[in-house]
Image (cartoon, grey):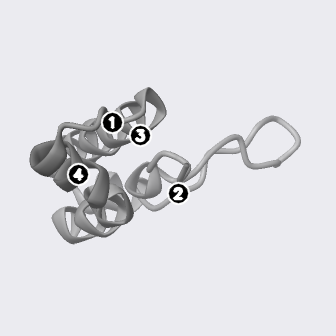
Amino acid sequence: QVKATAAGLLQPTDWYVTRKAEVGTDIPSAVLDYRAAVRTASGAIKTAITAVTTHDAFMALYTTPVDENGDPTGPAPINAWPEAI
């Protein structure tokens, strides 16, 4: 599922890579940064899943972190993907 999600996030910018390969047009740095961030997130999520040894640790991957007021501070680790550009 992680690989499928990463592929889906990368797909809208794949045309930049194709254009670069076909005609040599540079890929904007924001696109390169986003694509790298997706690959980094994919690796981190896969590593987190692989490291799980208990049911509680697995469930923690789906728990949204909150601050002292109970307000979300970011996504659950399993959903820690970069914002689309």
Coordinates of residue 27 in the picture (x, y in percent): 33, 36
Of marks 3 and 2, the one in the foreground? 3
Give the camera-side residue of 14 and 77.
14
Task: Tell me the amino acid under the disc marked 4.
Answer: Arg
Q: Secondary structure at mark 1?
A: loop
Task: Tell me the amino acid under the disc marked 3.
Answer: Val
Q: Which mark is residue 49?
A: none
Give the camera-side residue of 7 and 19.
19
Tag 1 and tag 3, C-beta contact below 8 Å: yes
Question: Label 4: which residue?
Answer: 19
Q: CA distance from mark 4 to mark 3?
A: 13 Å
Coordinates of residue 84 in the picture (x, y in percent): 53, 53
Tag 4 and tag 2, C-beta contact below 8 Å: no
Q: CA distance from mark 1 to mark 2?
A: 36 Å
Give the camera-side residue of 32 and 37.
32
Question: Label 1: which residue?
Answer: 27
Residue 51 in view (yes/no): no
